[in-house]
Image: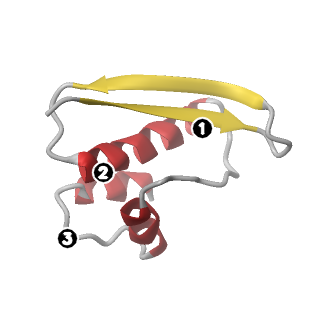
């Protein structure tokens, strides 16, 4: 499957800081794409020197996995471990 991910960074007042997107040529499923999106956004924040942030996602699996320390039975386990 193919897909795409994107990330938007805003400041504490909601003002735009940066955005980025990436095409995914090979992704197993939507959950994997959502995990890639998380990593993509965190990498963007890191590149801009942003260390304190709030993550928002429409994917409950991503939020629950990160709240559980990155533990998951999905094929995205390596992606989540990179995000910690």
Residue 73's tag is 3
| Eye-nearest disc, 3 or 1 | 3
Horizontal and vertical percent for residue 8? 60, 33
Q: For the point 67% across and 51% down, which residue is it?
A: 53
Q: Element at badge 1? A: helix
User: Is residue 24 among the parts visible in the rendering?
Assistant: yes
Q: Residue at x 51, y 24 (%)?
A: 20
Compared across the picture, whether 84 is left or right of 55 comes to left
Q: Distance between the residues labelled 2 and 3?
A: 12 Å
Image coordinates for residue 79, horizontal then vertical, percent: 30, 51
Q: Is residue 66 above or below residue 15?
A: below
- In the figure, is residue 71 to the left or right of 14? left
Mark 1 = which residue? 45
For the residues bearing labels 3 and 1, Cβ distance under 8 angstroms:
no
The answer to whether one can see residue 49 in this image is: no
Rendered location of residue 63, percent (x, y): 46, 64
Residue at 48% over, 54% down: 58
Image position, residue 28 (x, y; %):
14, 44
Of the 4 image quadrants, the one containing the N terminus is top left
Is tag 3's residue or tag 1's residue first in the polypeptide sequence?
1
User: At 30% from the left edge and 43% from the top edge, which residue is drawn?
Assistant: 33
Q: Is mark 3 on a helix, strand or loop?
A: loop
The local crowd at label 1, few if under 14, some if 14 to 19, many if 20 or more residues have their Cα within 10 Å, is many
In the displayed structure, 19 sits above or below 43; it is above
């Amino acid at each position: 499957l193919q897909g795409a991910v994107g990330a938007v960074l805003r400041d504490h007042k909601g003002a735009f800081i940066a955005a980025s997107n990436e095409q995914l040529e090979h992704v197993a499923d939507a959950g994997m794409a959502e995990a890639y999106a998380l990593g993509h956004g965190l990498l963007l924040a890191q590149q801009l020197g942003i260390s304190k942030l709030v993550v928002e996602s429409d994917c409950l699996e991503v939020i629950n996995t990160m709240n559980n320390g990155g533990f998951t039975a999905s094929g995205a386990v390596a992606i989540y471990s990179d995000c910690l």
